[in-house]
Image: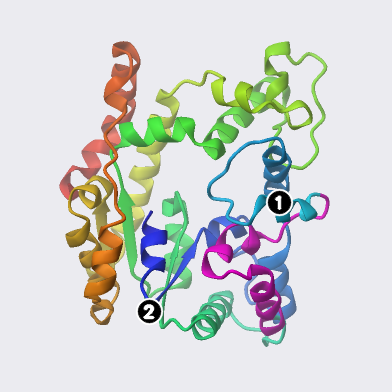
Amino acid sequence: MLSDLLSLHPDILSLSELFNALHPLGFQKDPVDGPTFWSVLSEPRPRHTAWLRLMERGLVIDEFRYPVASALRFRDTGIPPLLAMTLPPLTDHPDALHDELGMFVQSLPQDRVHRQYLRVFQWLCTRLGRRFWCERSGASLGLVHPLSHFFPDAKFIHVFRDGREFAVSASRFPLMRMGMISAMFKRKFGSAPYLAPAYEVPEDLPPEWRGLVPESFDVEVFQNFALPIEPIGSAWSEMIAVGLSLLEKLPAERVLHVRYESMLEAPHAELQRIVRFMDPGLDNPAWLIQAAGRVRKNPPKWVSLPDEERARLESACAPGMALLRRFS
């Protein structure tokens, strides 16, 4: 939501899921020359290719922003990561922009990796007529350490929500379900089904699980497969604890904590607070009215869980909720 709202601002280049798309290679090579850096930016990631196979069978992954019908041409070669999620929201012609960016990046001299990223971001700003860039990746609390190391002057906006509601939302989120099912497969069979385009189906796979593997994937089986919700709450609490400990090492003036529920309740005030934190020169009353008008209420769903399941979830989320209370 925040990425899409910021993208409406005439001065902001909103880069969505860039570092997520590049994981795990984003910061592995430093220093790096232009051609090698372009391979980091453009080398297909096996998980994106695996997603394509599942989307071909009807799975909807909203974060995958490249048109699915066109993406199927990458079915065998793999889709470049920036085309999967980051570039399509910026232009109606993501392939052309990707090609232009490739020519620019491959001409760069060897330099530290963070300076190469800054050159890319500045090139995109110039190319698309923006003057300020902002990158947002889901669950990027796990990236605070490399980001604060490589971008020591960066500002960080920590967007968080009620952990119980996060867990309910994540339990229905295809990529989170893939992660949980993959972990379950790895424990039972020693390998995970969604991390690579091909998967060797175990001989002793239970019949009711066959709709989960790529070769016989069934969207309905995948969506209805029962998964416990409290492990998501526990993982969320751990992520919050680690992420806040890293953010607390940064100067306080470089960190802004934004509560998702506050954005829903008072979008005008929260969006104004966000852009003023980014840069006071980004104040734009027309954008603020437009962006705030797109925010919709999202009533909590965790309260409707069965009593026992809700109690387990509340217990799992309690440590993270306690840490966040001072920002609420």
Position of 91 relative to 221 (above/below): below
Q: Residue at x 39, y 30 (%)?
A: 168
Task: Give the image location of residue 11, x and y in percent.
Answer: 38, 79
Question: Would you name the residue on which mark 2 appears?
Answer: 11
Instruction: Report the front residue among 226 and 244.
Output: 226
Picture quarter containing residue 174?
top right
Compute the Cα span from label 1 to label 2: 31 Å
Left or right: 4 in relation to 311: right
Main secondary structure type of the part rendered in magenta: helix
User: What's the residue at 70%, 22% (across, down)?
Assistant: 211
Q: Circle 1 is placed at which residue position?
A: 69
The residue segment tinted magenta is: 76-105
Whether residue 124 sits left or right of residue 198 in the image: it is: left
Location of residue 42 (image quadrant):
bottom right
Look at label 2 and name its amino acid: Asp
Please tell me which residue is depicted at 30% across the width and 72% down the height of the picture.
278
Q: Position of residue 324 (x, y in %)?
A: 23, 44
Residue 91: where, in percent of width, then height? 56, 70
- Front label number (1 vs 2): 1
Can residue 154 be seen in the rendering of this structure? yes
In the image, residue 243 sits, relative to residue 101, either above or below, namely: above
Q: Are marks 1 and 2 in contact (CB under 8 Å)?
A: no
